Amino acid sequence: MKIGQSGHNNVSLVQMNVFFRFINKLVPHLNTLSGKAIKALSPVRSASSPLADRLLADALRLAEIPSPTHQEEQRAAFILERLANLGIVPQMDDHGNILVRIVAHSPQDIQALLLFSDMGSKHWHPLESLTRLDARYARGAGLADILGCAALLSVAESLMENRLQSGRDVVLLFAAGSLDDPEGRAFFSISDNPSHFPCAAIGIRGLTLGSVITNTQGIYRIRVSMGREQAETAKDDEDGPDIPPEKPETANLVVDTLIGTARKLSGITWDSKGTTRFYIRRIEAGAGFGRAPREGILEIELESSDGAQLEMAMNTVLATAKASAQASATASAQAAASEIKTEVNITSFIPVGDYSEGARRAGEENNNSELFKIIRGVMKDLHIRLREENGADPSAILSNRGIPSFSIGIAQGWEGLNSDTIDIASIEKGRQLIEALIKKMGGLHE
């Protein structure tokens, strides 16, 4: 395959030199890890294929690299090194996203197929992410999160070595930030460059093979941080002023305010049809025994299949949370309420998708119907059981821009509290699914 030269390269030569110097320092360590990973996979090789083994080996190495970090530099370095070994010179934008366009030998359509996944993980742990293998399972914290990127590397390798043929260009996007970033930075390199506007997009995630979200829900995740001003510290000399003791009526002001805010939001009827749901995902405040808590966190999730209702609920949460210090203070502590400093941030956003249940009930035309038929047909041919599910899907960001989009899982397994468990044998079936979709979307058949 050839590498396309179209589009703008947003990375200066100086920036690329910095990245490649970093890669050169990292390569010896990566090669050591590579040997260990391949050796560890040898007992289970008979249950899969060399290509699936390579995919899992990449995932094992990526999962052990710390995340999340700023633009995932260390994981990006590993991916850039793997791409360089394949003879690929990728593009990288200002947000750290890596973009690869692999040009078909005889393209039948000028629009490419986009495959995307993100490099980060919210579950990395310095010990639990040291992956373990047995004859059937691979285990490690954050392992499911990175399988998608490892699958993209497998696609790049198959295309470059001509083991996989496509009738159209294939664009691979390794997102440095979370796909549900409220700023939408993961897809800037696609939306800012018309030449990369795809015919369709498929998000690749680790779990679960066969599941497709067809009733797409929109979500907002909101973080409310509350804190009080610290009292002035006493001077070192003996004549320095003493720190006044906390008054009983204000000692638990942060805790009371957090609880009052949560109760008030929980009591709201968001809509008459019950399409909008409110969840408290985390509430925490404290500073240890014998000390009054001065900081607290409330994390909220809103979910709805109605985009307008979701926006209305989000604005209600923001307004209520910002006024929570005054609303929750008791009459005796009203003067102290002004001490509470409240900060409200939207940490995650996924819109209601083009293939939502509401749109289908209304008989609205959508861009995803034909793509879903293709996915369903390919899964049937591979004897993969299709499960239509409800939930939020980052691919809705693209489907709302007129790009047919779905996300698929490539492995069986489960996410645990401290570690993910992946069925090793299922990875080969997931790899076959991706390749079959690329052939089908490119107009090629088995």
Image (tube, rainbow, N blue to C red):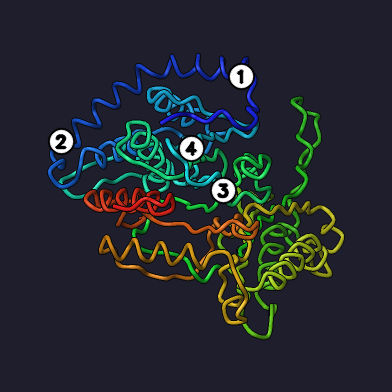
Q: CA distance from mark 2 to mark 1?
A: 39 Å
Q: Secondary structure at mark 1?
A: helix
Is there any visible trace of residue 396 in the rendered image? yes
Q: Nearer the viewer, mark 3 or mark 4?
A: 3
Which of the image's four quarters has the N terminus? top left
Q: Amino acid at mark 3?
A: Pro
Q: Residue at 78%, 54% (x, y): give it.
A: 340
Amino acid found under the numbered disc labelled 4 = Ser
Between the residue at mark 4 and the residue at mark 2, the CA separation in whole angstroms equals 28 Å
Q: Amino acid at mark 1?
A: Gln
In three-dimensional space, the C-alpha distance between marks 1 and 4, rounded to whole angstroms, equals 21 Å
Q: Nearer the viewer, residue 376 or 34?
A: 376
Q: Taking 362 as reference, is 19 left or right?
A: left
CA gap, disc 2 to disc 3?
Answer: 38 Å
Q: Residue furthest right?
A: 335
Residue in front for this viewpoint, 272 or 109: 109
**Residue position marked by numbered label 2 in the rendering:** 42
Residue 15, x across and y down, in percent: 61, 19
Q: Nearer the viewer's eye, disc 4 or disc 2?
A: 2
Query: Circle 4 sits on which residue?
Result: 67
Residue identified by numbered label 1: 15
Circle 3 residue: 198
Measure the C-alpha gap from mark 3 to mark 4: 29 Å
Pointers 4 and 2 in contact (CB under 8 A)? no
| Mark 2 surroundings within 10 Å by alpha-carbon count, few (fewer than 14), some (14 through 19), many (20 or more) | few
- Mark found first going from the N terminus, 1 or 4: 1
Residue at point 36%, 41% (across, down): 165
Say which amino acid is labelled 2: Ser
* In the foreground, 291 or 75: 75
